[in-house]
Amino acid sequence: MADTREGHWDTVYTTKADEAVSWYQPVPETSLRLIRACHLPKDASILDVGAGASRLPDALLGEGFTNIAVLDVSAAALARTKARLGGKGISVRFIVADVATWEPDFPVDLWHDRAVLHFLTEPQDRVAYVDALRRTVRPGGFVLVSGFAPSGPERCSGLPVLRADPDAIAVLLGPEFELIEAFEEDHQTPSGGRQRFVFTRFRQRGAQGQ
Ligand SMILES: C[S@@+](CC[C@H](N)C(=O)[O-])C[C@H]1O[C@@H](n2cnc3c(N)ncnc32)[C@H](O)[C@@H]1O
């Protein structure tokens, strides 16, 4: 089972404490700053793709957002978030799915991905990811994608990753998405290491002129 995608990730989330994984953040500050910069209404539909056991939904609920969905290939990861949120998470939509095969069935105003696309090293999986994204993000909606920078690590969670700069992410998403901002930042891992990340914020161009 560990040799499948969900098997790998379920093993991670059933054997390691939240704080024991390199990508852990007590508060996802940079993602929150980028989300705030989109000036979305509190009932905007926000999807965290490959959410894992991230504290992002906790923080978004704390900011008053009411329409949050989290998707991950690992049921164990989402079970952790569900348990942690308890009654606060009653309105959160939990979706166990591989983003590369997921059939989107609702529109979103903001697609958030921290350190997920970079695991899709096969071209057909990246095409499927973008296809799902295009079908999901509303005209004028936002896309936040972050992952390892070109100078970042070559592997994450023992798996190879495809490091990318903002231009490469922009080419992948296609011309209907305008790159609004991009920057690099070090993530400090719980064990004291540093990982160079690229953060990007795009807007679907359909909103222009509205
Ligand atoms: C490095 S972790 C990042 C988790 C979270 N975004 C965060 O910032 O804490 C990568 C996450 O992506 C999920 N994942 C990996 N490949 C995936 C796929 N193809 N579809 C959906 N989720 C995936 C993993 O289960 C894991 O939770």
Image: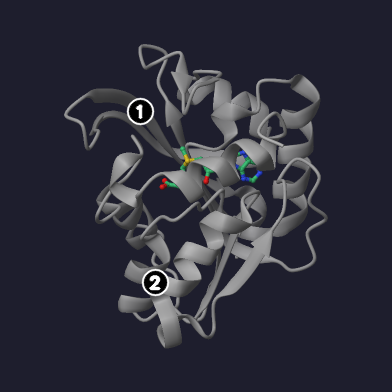
Q: Quadrant of the C terminus?
A: bottom right
x and y percent of residue 128 in the render? 79, 37
Instruction: Give the answer, above or below, for where 122 lies relative to 116.
Output: above
The residue furthest left is 192
Residue 35 percent across, percent down from the top left: 38, 58
Instruction: Determine the quadrant in which ligand 1 lies.
Output: top right
- In depth, the one of 55 and 62 nearer the eye is 55
Q: Is residue 152 left or right of residue 73?
A: left
Report the Cα–Cα distance between label 2 and label 1: 27 Å
Q: Along the polypeptide, which appears first: circle 2 or circle 1?
A: 2
Residue at 31 percent across and 77 percent down: it is: 62
Where is mark 1, residue-wise?
197
**Would you say 120 lies left or right of 163 here?**
right
Q: In the rendered image, is residue 39 in sight? A: yes
Callout 2: SS: helix
Residue named by callout 2: 84
Q: Amino acid at mark 2?
A: Arg
Nearer-the-camera pick, 205 or 55? 55
Q: Quadrant of residue 177?
A: top right
Vertical arrangement, residue 51 with respect to residue 125, above or below: below
Mark 2: few/some/many CA within 10 Å (<14, 14-19, 20+)? some
* Amino acid on which disc 1 is placed: Phe
Residue 63 visible (yes or no): no
Residue at image point 50% right, 50% down: 14
The residue located at (21%, 24%) in the rendering is 193
**Where's residue 53, x and y in %?**
44, 56
- Residue 34 percent across, percent down from the top left: 35, 52
- Relative to 112, residue 63 above or below: below
Figure quadrant of residue 101: top right
Tell me the SS state at disc 1. strand
Query: Does the residue at mark 2 contact the one at mark 1 (Cβ under 8 Å)?
Result: no
Q: Residues within 10 Å of mark 1 (few under 14, many from 20)?
A: many
